Image (spheres, coloured by chain):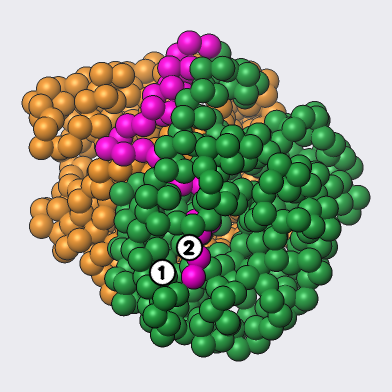
Amino acid sequence: MLVTTTGRLPIVSDGRHPLRAAVEEWRARVTPTPDSAWRDEALRAVQAETQAELLAAQADAGADILDSGYVPVYDEWFQMARAVAGLDVAAPLRYLDTNTYYHHWVLDKMPARAAESPTVSAYRHAAALTAAPVKPALFGPYTIWAYADRQGGGDTPAAFSALVDLWAEDAAALAAAGARYIQIEESVVLRPKHRPDFPLVAQAVERIARAAPEAKIILHLACGEVGDLLEPLLAIPGLGGLGLDFTDAYRAPNLAALAGWRGDAILQAGIADSRHIRVETESELHETLAAVAAAVPVEQCWAAPSTALLYLPRHAAFDKLATLARAAHRFGKEGA
Amino acid sequence: MRELPILPISSIGSLPKPPALFQAEMAPLEQQDRAWMRRSQEAAVADWLGIQESLGIDVLVDGEQYRRSMTTYFLEGWGCADIDPDPVWVLDNMYGQRAVIKREATAPRALLVDWYRFAASHATREIKVTVTGPYTLRDWVFDLHYADRRAAVLGLAAYVREEVHGLVAAGVRHLQIDEPAFVTRYDQPAELDVAVEAMQRICADLPPHVTVSTHMCYGAFHEVYPKMLELPAQVFCLELAHVAPEMLDILRRHPFPADRAMGYGVVDAQDPRVESVEEIEGRIRLALEYFAPEQLWINPDCGLQAVPRESAVAKLENLVAATHRVRQTLA
């Protein structure tokens, strides 16, 4: 059984990290604007070193499929916006129920590509640093759309479609650069308010998958119950895998939903709680894996944290990942 | 006691700390020079009280100069939590220390009384004391002690109640119970009900001369309005400088009740750019389209700790000037 991470990772240990210090140094040295961050060679060098460190840390913990380890100066939404022509970002908004904040987009016109996405260059750098497969993780176009301040021409079906085009271009570029797995994070669609928009997510994933046929597109949905969306999710043409959350309050309903699993998509099973500091025991993880494997062929299952480990202190995040890897590898060898 | 003018002006909570104090408080509590810290914190509180008074703020805050964060200060101070050594990413390049609740409180729930007395002795205007609400105290930390979230929130509510009632006994007339996490699980009604029940327990039996405010920020307020009105607060201090059209729309459909007040946020607490007087005046005039003047307070979006000191002062200065302009036209 393969073990993967599910997005961005924490970096700071005991209050310190070279990237944190470099950003502070940069803020003191220049007028801190997104453009100056984007162009600053010193910052980019530390970001590259950080990637190497995080790739090694994931491998040391036992992960088989790695996140690229890219850490933006601001946040991922902000970073993606820099590659879109004439796009402004606005004040940070709280993401889901986390105590973390992302700058939301101001969509007031049709979005169009301005530059290569930083996700692509980050993937290239990561792939050059490790022989292990790297799975770049992107927030999906629906999440950006759902949180955006949409106005005028930016609040139209055509604008959403143009947004999906950008993600499809990124996916194609990632696949051309060698990515065999691409994670698209759209957890927000599991929220009751957003569930009616599921067709937008399905349409986006289908088009992204079509643009990158060499790669498996893993749609990751954390912090929610999949419920009656499982069947239409698995019916999305080109879907390579589905990430679900089997922790906390979502464990029982999502395990129950697996009775409807069909097809050959990967199940990226989020069994280690990325929102709780307590490190699960191997036997607890084993029990959840057994329940998952009762419904989905074990060769289709990856073991994963429930969502990005970013939301945990660094020591807890990597302890969890190491425990998860031990439990999953043992399960893969010995079975239930 | 000084009568508050129409459109009373208040600060929200945190204000920028002197760099030396900010650096020093990052060390573990047991490694800190407590006497130096106390002197520095008192000097910083007195400084900000003086600045706010000189600018013309009507209801002052102490700027939370002695709190490392709005959650750890209480949980660590009550002895029920330890601070995890690895801070967690919050936004941009900002990382926050996270408390881990591990036990029942072991210290008195009376952290703020001395600070209130200190502030009151250094100000001639009203002081508003800010307390983090129990729902946020639970939501923004890790919990290894309580059986479930409800038990944690209600357990912490009992501690907050002790703080609050101690403050009232010491003479506090303006309280702000911060619940920014109230906007995070808007589609889980049971969660909102727990937050409401917790604040009701805290505020039960408070004397009528005490004005209770609550504060929320960086969330989809329209998703919790009018539900938020179940919170037993008289003033709702919200981050509205960039008010979402959805919020204005729902205010049109569900007008704010006449017996409540809105603490309308008119300056951005994250952006160091200083809004002009005209820009802020425009935001106040927009607010007056939805609220009667007598139910409107004017405040920043949130605590101004994230912007440089000079930006914070200039923002408050322009906020006061803009409010005075609008007051003149209302007179």
Is A218 in front, or is A63? A63
Q: Nearer the viewer, residue A11 or A217?
A: A217
In the rendered structure, which segment of residues is drawn in magenta?
A1-30
- Percent from the top left, x then y, of residue A227? 63, 80
Q: Looking at numbered disc 1 in the image, what kind of residue is underneath it? A: His
Residue at x 47% of width, y 25% of height: A46
Asked if labels 1 and 2 touch by Cβ distance under 8 angstroms, the answer is yes
Q: Where is A2 relative to B319, above or below?
A: below
Q: Quadrant of the C terminus of chain B?
A: top right
- Residue at 20%, 32% (x, y): give it: B27
In the structure shown, which secondary structural element does the residue marked by tag 2 occupy? strand
Chain ID for green: A
Q: Are marks 2 and 1 on the same chain?
A: yes
Element carrying mark 1: helix
- How many labels, in total? 2
**Given the image, on which type of amino acid does mark 2 rest?**
Val
Give the residue at mark 2. A3
Which chain is represented by orange in the image? B
In the rendered structure, find residue A329 and report the number of the disc placed on it. Answer: 1
